[in-house]
Amino acid sequence: MSAPASSTELHRLTAHEAQELLSNREVSARELTQASLDRIAAVDEQIGAYLTVVEEHALAQADAADERIGRGDGGPLTGIPVAVKDNMCTVGIRTTCGSRMLEQFVPPYNAHVIERLNDAGAVLLGKTNMDEFAMGSSVEHSAFHPTHNPWSLDRVPGGSSGGSAAAVAADEAIVALGSDTGGSVRQPAAHCGVVGFKPTYGRVSRYGLVAFASSLDQIGPLTKDVRDCALLMNAISGQDPRDATSAPIEVPDFTAALTGEVQGLRVGVVSEYVPGDLDPAMRGVAEAAVKQFEELGATVEWGVSLPSTEYALACYYIIAPSEASANLARYDGVKYGYSYTEGESMWENMDKTRQFGFGDEVKRRIMIGTYALSSGYYDAYYLKALQVRTLIRREFEEAFERFDVLLGLVAPTPAFRLGEKLDDPYQMYLSDIFTLPQPIAGIPSISVPAGFVEGPAGERLPVGLQLMGRPFDEAMLLRAADAYERATSWREQRPEW
């Protein structure tokens, strides 16, 4: 695919296409950044992808990138406009987590990934919308406004990183970062027709990522193609001494893995992620993807079972809320963030701070977690969930003794309509059923565009293929995803505006 030459089309570029133009001095970083800012101004009123746009900051970074490129000191991300989910700390730029609790919070430091992006010379366009404290699957739980799916404005973009996914899909950013605790990068990537990658737990530092569930959270890229995903992974991966859970493991050049070759790759199709009672159109997408891998020379086996998958939903909704109830205890109205001050006592002020500062979904999960950790219930719920977590991890380990990559769908349905599941939390939680086991086990997984299904009004709704790999074998996943992407035309299809 050749890069668009017109300045009016610069926002449609991938990062590697844009970098070629920047390196050849055919376009400046300021022009590229201005094109993205103009695109945001033109369409974001309809999409609602951003919570904060930092135009002056972005143009200043773009000018610095142009100077760097002029000195011959540029890299793959120098001058590339990036959007960042609003739960990653950015010095001097508010970080709200989609919550009234942090509506006016301006961090005094940068998250590790922001430092890495700055070191690479990337340009921060702004902070994207999200479900409050990353708790949700639709961005309808943002305290500020919902985000709309660029493919169909009456549908959700997925969550909780739906703002970042929608920004990339609508060409409001060249690339973006999100966070994935139970599918929050991969599910919106699937619903918006972009690439979304959840690295192995520990591959990317969580320093400066506002915590939801500390044993599950992981930062990952949302991009227009797999090569851009690999470029971002190169930039943000690696050990960080400020995060004790970041792994002291060497980071390979992930772009070197993109050979297009999967001859002999052993692929297992997970029955629980392509169940027999799945909608025929959704199943057809998976079957077509399997056929494509076979044509590329991979060895594919159907019927691989991970029996504990059926317990993943219950396991996740004990572990994640339990950790959230502990992490969110810091929001007491005393240290920072929203503070209610009109009560008759400190305790009343604290209660009112949490009553008015948190939304319904966040309060629901805090209560679930507090209950699960309470005296008399810890062994029955939290300890049991940790035992199930061990079973899930072992089943993945056994599967990877036979296969290099596991395959399934990202979600059981395409993007649902705004408001459709808002009053039924359980149905909302079920939309993540295929993306919960991977963070529970700590393994990497990727969503790559795999086709479309037709909505009731004739709209084309994207579907994502999920590939899963061994811990710290992100290179294998990226190689498989890239080969599949090259053999199909799905990534070239974009929502019409």
Image (cartoon, rainbow, N blue to C red):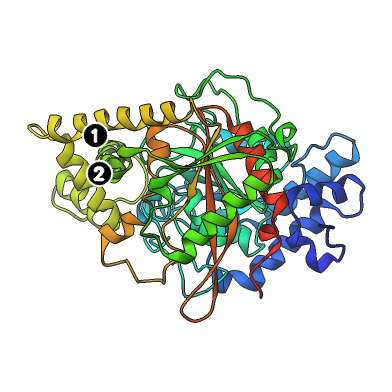
Of pointers 2 and 1, the one earlier in the residue sequence: 2
Residue found farthest to the bottom: 457
Image point 50% across, 49% down: which residue? Answer: 186
Q: Amino acid at mark 1?
A: Ala
Q: Where in the figure is residue 65, as x and y percent of width and height?
A: 79, 44
Q: Where in the figure is residue 307, as x and y percent of width and height?
A: 32, 38
Residue for badge 2: 314
Can residue 90 be seen here? The reply is no
Q: Is residue 376 left or right of residue 74?
A: left
Mark 2: give few (<14), some (14-19) or many (20+) Cα within 10 Å: some
Can residue 443 be seen here? The reply is yes
Assign a secondary structure to mark 2: helix
| Quarter residue 358 falls in | bottom left
Rendered view: 205 above or below 267: above
Q: Quadrant of the C terminus?
A: bottom right
Mark 2 to mark 1 CA distance (whole Å): 8 Å
Q: Is residue 379 left or right of residue 256?
A: left
Q: Quadrant of the N terminus?
A: bottom right
Q: Which mark is residue 302?
A: none
Residue for badge 1: 385
Q: Amino acid at mark 2?
A: Ala
Cβ–Cβ under 8 Å for marks 2 and 1 = yes
Rendered view: 326 above or below 57: above
Assign a secondary structure to mark 1: helix
Q: Where in the figure is residue 393, as x and y percent of width and height?
A: 37, 29
Query: Which is more toward the observer, 285 or 385?
Result: 285
